[in-house]
Every structure is written in structure tokens, then in C-alpha cells.
Amino acid sequence: MELRDACRIAWNELKHRYIALLANVLFSALIGFFLAHDMVRTLAGGSMQPGVSFPVDLWLIAVVPTLGALAFSREYISFSYLVSEEPFLKRLRFFRMWAIPLKVVAWSRMLYMTMCLGISLLVLVSVFVTVSGPALLGVLSVAEYAAFVFVWVGYAFAVGSINPYLEFGTTGKAILIGSFPAVLLIVAGVLMFYLHFKQPVYLWVFELARGNPPAAMILSVLIAVLGVLGFHRALVYRLARKDLP
């Protein structure tokens, strides 16, 4: 009953936000294309292009998980709207006004994130497979190829699950202020990784997954499930203690 009600709430919101979802989908296709292009050049062609690899790493690590939050919607594009209007707080007030159980509210946000991210990742993976498949499947086994995809999908769902918590558990100002240090830390981390390992982060992850593809796929699914369940529980805990002005 809780999941059914939550799914209805999530779908009713998502179906009215098709423009932002389309922007997410187009950006996901772009990421999939550049990832495929760089990986083919590196594994099939034998040459790495740092100019392509660095932004691909940043997109995979920092941007892809945010696609579950409709990053191109007004809430995130207009910083003044995010801070002054508090759109997520307004939505939370609406849910609480109708006495919707906290677990249902939390699940609706998790399912909303899952729908947005799932659609975006479906496009990203489709473009990646279409562009890179013919070249890479001559170099890699199907299991190795699939393991690489599973690892990043699992990572995206696990990390992306923090978005509903931040939206409904914090404030617009906290989201805005926290996003800039997070991006700077990720950029610094990727640069340090390049200096130390002399390769893109995604290729290092690929080598780990390549060692045991079945274990990598199982672990990625487990991490995704734990991420969703963990942040759902954290969001319920936070909502129960959140004072609405």
C-alpha cells in the first residue's frame, strides 16, 4: 500500500515535468557518447585523450547521480528561486497538510528519483552501447562489458539517493552552499587520481570490474539497493524531526 501510494504521487509529479526530463535525457545521451568515444579510443585504439577523459570522469562521478533530481528543472537552474521560494519545502508542507504518512512521502521521493535517473541512465547506456559496442566487444568479453556498465549504474543509484534527502531533509540554501564545495572536492580528487594513476577514473574502475565481472555486477546491485534503502530511512528520520515553518 505504501509503495503503491508513493508511486502514484511520484508519477503524478513527473508527468508534468517532461521538459526538464527531456533535458536530462539529452544530456545523458551526450555523456554516453563521449564516454563511448573515449573508451573506444583508449581500449580499441590504444591512445588516451585526457581532454575527453577528464570531463567524462567528472560527468560520471559528479553529474550522473544528480540526474535523478531533474537537474535542469527550475528548482536548480534558478538559484534565487531555490533559496527564496523553497520549492521543496512548499511541496513538503502540501504533503503534510494532507496527513500523508512520512514513509509514503519518503518513498515517493525515492521512486521519483528512481524514475528520473532510470530513464536518464537508460538513454545514456543505450547511446554508450550503440557507439562503443561494435568496437569494444571485439576487445572485451560481454561479461566484462556488462560489468563496467553495471558498476556505474549501481554507483549512480546509490549516490543519487542522497538527492531526495537533501531536497526534503534540508533547505534550498543548504543545497546551494553544499554543492560548490562538493564539486571542488570532486575536481581536486579526479586531478589527484590522474597524477597518481596516470589514467581516467572510469578505466581504473573498469580494470577492477574486469577482474571478476559477476562479483562486480552483484556488488553494484547490492550497493544501489543499500543506498536507496539507507537514504530512505535517513529521510524518514529527518522528516519526523523537521519543524515546518
Image (tube, grey):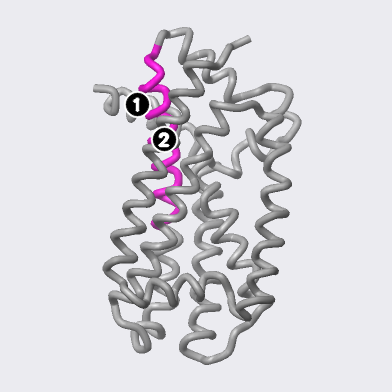
Q: Position of residue 124 (x, y in %)?
A: 45, 61
- Amino acid type at circle 1 is Ala
Q: Is residue 41 left or right of residue 82?
A: left
In the rendered view, tell whether residue 182 sits above or below residue 153. Answer: above
Tell me if 221 is positioned left or right of 236 in this view: left
Quadrant in the rendering for residue 8: top left
In front of the other: 15 or 113: 113
**Quadrant of the image containing the C terminus:** top right
The magenta span reads: 100-122
Compared to residue 46, the image places residue 61 above or below, namely: above
Q: Is residue 119 magenta?
A: yes
- Residue 19 seen from this side: no
Q: Position of residue 158 (x, y in %)?
A: 44, 48
Quick one: label 1, few (<14), some, or many (20+) residues within 10 Å? many
Tell me the element at label 2: helix
Q: Which residue does the numbered mark 2 point to in the structure image?
A: 110
Residue type highlighted by circle 2? Met
Q: Is residue 58 left or right of residue 126?
A: right
The mark that comes first in sequence, 2 or 1, is: 1
For the point 72% across and 47% down, the residue is 181
Q: Residues within 10 Å of mark 2 (few under 14, many from 20)?
A: many
- The image shows residue 200 at horizontal and vertical percentages of 58, 74
Residue tagged 1: 6
Question: Would you identify the image quadrant in which residue 122 lies?
Answer: bottom left
